[in-house]
Amino acid sequence: MAVDILMPALSPTMEEGTLAKWLKGEGDKVEAGDVIAEIETDKATMEVEAVDEGTLAKILIPEGTEGVKVNAVIAVLTEDGEDASAVSAPAESDVEKVTPVAEPEVLEAQAAADAPAAPALTNPDIPEGTTFTKTVLRDALRDAMAEEMRRDETVFVMGEEVAEYQGAYKVTRELLQEFGPRRVVDTPITEHGFAGLGVGAAFGGLRPIVEFMTFNFAMQAIDQIINSAAKTLYMSGGQMGCPIVFRGPNAAASRVGAQHSQDYAAWYGHVPGLKVVAPWDAGSAKALLKSAIRDPNPVVFLEHELLYGLEYDVPDLEDYTLPIGKAAVIRKGTDVTLVGYSRMVGFAMDAAEQLAAEGISAEVIDLRSIRPLDMDTIVQSAMKTNRLVTAEEGWKHMGVGGEIDAGGPEQGLDSLDAPRMRVPQNEVPLPYAGNLEDMSLPNAGDIVAAAKAVCEGM
Amino acid sequence: MAKAATPKRRSSPKLKKDEALKYYRDMVLIRRFEERAGQLYGMGKIAGFCHLYIGQEAVVTGMQACLKEGDQVITGYRDHGHMLACDMDPRGVMAELTGRAGGYSRGKGGSMHMFSREKNFFGGHGIVGAQVPIGTGLAFSNKYLGKDNVCLAYFGDGAANQGQVYEAFNMASLWELPVIYVIENNMYAMGTSVERHASETELYKRGISFEIAGEEVDGMDVYAVKKAGEKAVKHARSGRGPYILEMKTYRYRGHSMSDPAKYRKREEVDDIRSHNDPIDGLKEQIVAQNIASEEDLKAIDKEIRAIVKDAADFSLESPEPDPAELWTDVLLPVEA
């Protein structure tokens, strides 16, 4: 019986890839374990091995095809003795399946950027006439580090797999080649130890960038981040500054379960002596990472794995930085203010688009920084729209949204004439099952629903 | 009962006068300073946690003698002796203990959290073992910047059981970092004797699986400490990586001021005090070798008492921090 060979998923977040090369041709005998093709993802080129043995009867996706969806049929294998010519051509629907389609989030970002009625103001402070280059988030972060490493000899990056492996998520790609092993340091798997070592290096006059493969693993190191990095300046009466950046992917990835999926914004945002940044798009992420590296204080820089591969407009400005602690209004509106950070900003932009179609004009604020929290920008917007929805991937209890809400009486939010609403992750450890994971995490639909609820009777 | 550092025949080098008297003076300063700190604590002038170094004076005194300009020192919370050995001003240290504006951290750190960039003393850390990776990071910065400086990272026998110590050992050895791990084995991790808390009680062996050389040292003999320290510092400074020194020492007082020390017998303490005290031991050698007379040493004692009295007076006269200090030093300003 003929066996379909499917486009494999090579990482938890891969949805499609490029079929770079066929290493076997039609009519070739294939043993289980033979490498039959090479597939490029946004992170790496991987080899595909045959699972079954037989004859490669038909190649359905020619090499060089981009945007091949995971699980599309790419070839057909026949068992020995079976007639290869009996294999029928693929159904029309299968061909459609492999038509390159952008990821939903890319569409979402583009939709926001392309909407003429409400132009995206991703970086409202960029001068008019600036040109942009499409860059994926991971490369923008890499560029930020490379620029700062060129600028300052004391900046170095350390972490697990940052050098030879080129980064577990390829954020440090090519840094080793340019800066060498003295400044791009592979560490053992020893988060508590290398976080503390980084703190000591900062006390010793260097500017370390400590990469955590994910912030989930930084739990091993949280004592050094808080007790050593954040508090020592105060405890030393101002003598011992700790210029260090702790960075890496934060919050949910895709189907990696509870221990690998958690938003730490509220955890670190709680601590005086730390700055906490959680950017969304590549342009502001690059500018904020450069600021974080230059900052004389410890900065926790929360990235998002699900955004790493997304393309955004990055301004062609030399040495472009953004101030930490300043939020940005990235879409103007009059009826409701949607506040988010990191991946939630994309969902808020998408929600704003959907709301516009229903006659509700939403203003979107990209928080960018969790600490300091730019309450002025939030209050200014909310005073205008009189309605506020906050979205976060963290839990609601003691969360970032709660902090914004509580800013009420002192900050002037208490004059709002409608209840504020929070859109958080459900109060459960993140489940593995796809349907339960979807239910647990906030998305654009949840933001739309919350916005409609606070706008009811408008 | 724990088996405390047993009295041994002291190293009996031919002492040089200046050196011997400096060690004597430095150790007496620490002893008298700590006694006064204990007194001020009893008077309610020093609050919170206060861990005295009495009995362990030879360790920091001997190790400090091995360092040169730019070398760094870092330790845990039993840190007053280390600061005085680093030549920090007794006034500033005592005023930090009393939580006053004249303290090294302007009253915001206290006994366990004091620093002096000027004297290359990097704390004073309150979390058991946290100073070990940090000290290793200081050594990393020395190597990165091409300096031939070394870092002394002190920790106790209790901290020797923390996981991050071994994470630091691994990286220090892997990257040949110039750090000397000085384990001050005073026989008790708070109230738990080393036999009860350590599967391998010979702590200098703890680096074996990381290929870090280590040796046991009589931490009650300043010359033995210095001799071992010089070897270790030379090793690290020459680019051969870390070194472990296990100082067998003893604290006479409790773990902290609130510790009644019920876990050991009074006779154990008395035995060490009377047979193996680091200051008495040095004193005997100085007198025996006719380097100075009892009278000369008494003159030094008197001078030290005056310094300590001055520090105590300063620490009580120095005002409490200005209320505005509550809000300073949380973050450094970002340069434009």
Image: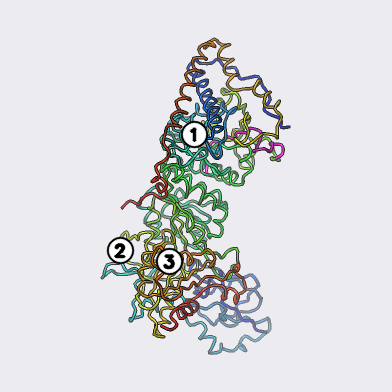
Q: Is residue B219 above or below residue A162?
A: above
The amino acid sitting under disc 2 is: Leu
Q: Secondary structure at mark 2?
A: loop
Q: Nearer the viewer, residue A441 or A74?
A: A441
Nearest to viewer (mark 1 / mark 2) = 2
- Assign the C terminus of chain A to one quadrant of the image: bottom left
Q: Position of residue A275 (x, y in %)?
A: 43, 56
The label on residue B237 is 1
The amino acid sitting under disc 3 is: Gly
Q: Position of residue A391 (x, y in %)?
A: 47, 71
**What residue does disc 3 label?**
A408
B204 with respect to A149 (left or right):
right
Q: Position of residue B172 (x, y in %)?
A: 54, 42
Which quadrant holds residue B77? Answer: top right
Q: Separation of disc 1 and disc 2 at Cα?
A: 45 Å
**What residue does disc 2 label?**
A317
Q: Separation of disc 3 and disc 1 at Cα?
A: 58 Å
